[in-house]
Amino acid sequence: MYEGAIQDLIDELGRLPGVGPKSAQRIAFHVLSADPADVTRLATALRRVKELVRFCTTCYNVAESEQCRVCRDQRRTDEVLCVVEEPKDVVAIERTGEFRGRYHVLGGAINPLEGIGPDNLRIRELLARLGTGTVRELILATDPNTEGEATATYLALMVKPMGIAVTRLASGLPVGGDLEYADEITLGRAFEGRRAV
């Protein structure tokens, strides 16, 4: 539609996940009309993230040093390990303030349709961490979708023979939700995960 640099920017923005053609166009024109100092800060932030950010050598969370802040925190317990799909999942769990153990980031979930199998994830590294004998409980915190469930089931089968307790995050009704709007699967899981009061 456009020519030169603006079309190149729209095309590159459109390649980002969750950014469609209209959003890419809207962002590109925002950048075009933005203050040059704002654009420079954005470009610097993009460049810095590629230069400085890497994956933690222990848990594969994002880090700016060899280990992430969670792995460097000596107050955390090594006996409980929470497996998540992506680094953004670590942030979500940390916001709750409820978990004081360690993490392991798989780098995705098993998805045969996309060609992602167990060998494409950091499962070997997880099994090596579990082989040290320190971990007593493995919490499977993969997404409650088909891929996440397949990944959790696969990991549970791999880990159970090691004698480690394997648990899965409960799923069900959100706080403030109405029963009439809940789908059958969510409501069914809420019944399965019910607890005494």
Image (cartoon, grey):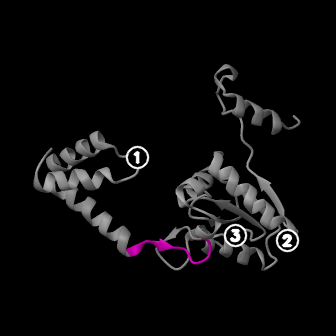
Which mark is nearer the camera, 3 or 2? 2
Where is residue 109? Give x, y as percent.
60, 58
Q: Residue at x 27, y 39 (%)?
A: 22
| Residue 75 numbered tag | 3
Residue type at the position of mark 3: Arg
**33 is higher (above) or lower (below) than 104:** above
Where is residue 14? Give x, y as percent.
30, 50
| Residue 18 numbered tag | 1
Q: Residue at x 72, y 78 (%)?
A: 128
Where is residue 167? Give x, y as percent.
79, 55
The answer to which quarter of the image holds residue 178 is top right
> Which span of residues is magenta-colored?
52-59
Which residue corresponds to mark 2?
A: 162
Q: Residue at x 64, y 28 (%)?
A: 176
**121 is higher (above) or lower (below) than 185:** below
Secondary element at image label 2: helix
Q: Earlier in the sequence, mark 2 or mark 1?
A: 1
